[in-house]
Image: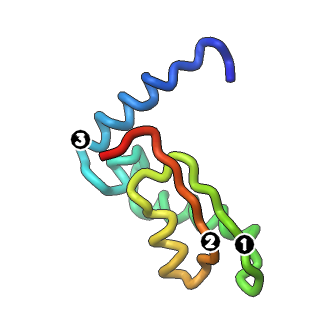
């Protein structure tokens, strides 16, 4: 990571979004539900649904990726990590 990278700024930015919009696509800085799901579908194109896989969701927000993958019947194992607990 570059020396100028400030993780606290990132944490504060997303905390403000979450405070403003709650657990929603806007609350994790997506511009819409559709754009969020489009990004998830692009990531899932590399997954063979007939095989088990593991997915690491860094900055997992409110768990939308996991929820979406489960709804699509495409979740094997998932780990998520967040910058701030709420």
Find out whether the residues at labels 1 and 2 contact each other: C-beta distance under 8 Å: yes
Image coords of residue 77 (percent x, y): 62, 71
In three-dimensional space, the C-alpha distance between marks 1 and 3, rounded to whole angstroms, equals 33 Å
**Of the numbered discs in the image, which one, if any, rests on residue 77?**
2
**Badge 1 density bin: few <14, some 14–19, many ≥20, Cα 10 Å:** few
Q: Foreground mark, 2 or 3?
A: 2
Mark nearer the N terminus (2 vs 3):
3
Percent from the top left, x then y, of residue 14?
38, 37
Closer to the camera in the image, 31 or 72? 72
Q: Nearer the viewer, residue 43 or 75?
A: 75
The residue sitting at 60% across, 13% down in the picture is 4
In the image, taking residue 48 as reference, residue 18 lies left or right, namely: left
Q: Residue at x 49, y 52 (%)?
A: 60
Decide if residue 5 is on the left or right side of residue 86: right
How far apart are labels 2 and 3 at the CA level? 29 Å
Residue 30, placed above or below residue 83:
below
Lower sequence index among marks 1 and 2: 1
Marks 1 & 3, CB-CB < 8 Å contact: no
């Amino acid at each position: 990571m570059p020396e100028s990278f400030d993780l606290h700024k990132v944490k504060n930015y997303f905390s403000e979004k979450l405070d403003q919009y709650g657990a929603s696509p806007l609350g994790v800085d997506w511009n819409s539900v559709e754009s969020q799901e489009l990004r998830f579908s692009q990531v899932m194109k590399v997954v063979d649904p007939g095989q088990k896989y593991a997915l690491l969701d860094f900055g997992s927000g409110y768990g939308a990726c996991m929820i979406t993958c489960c709804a699509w019947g495409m979740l094997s194992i998932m780990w998520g990590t967040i910058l701030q607990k709420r």
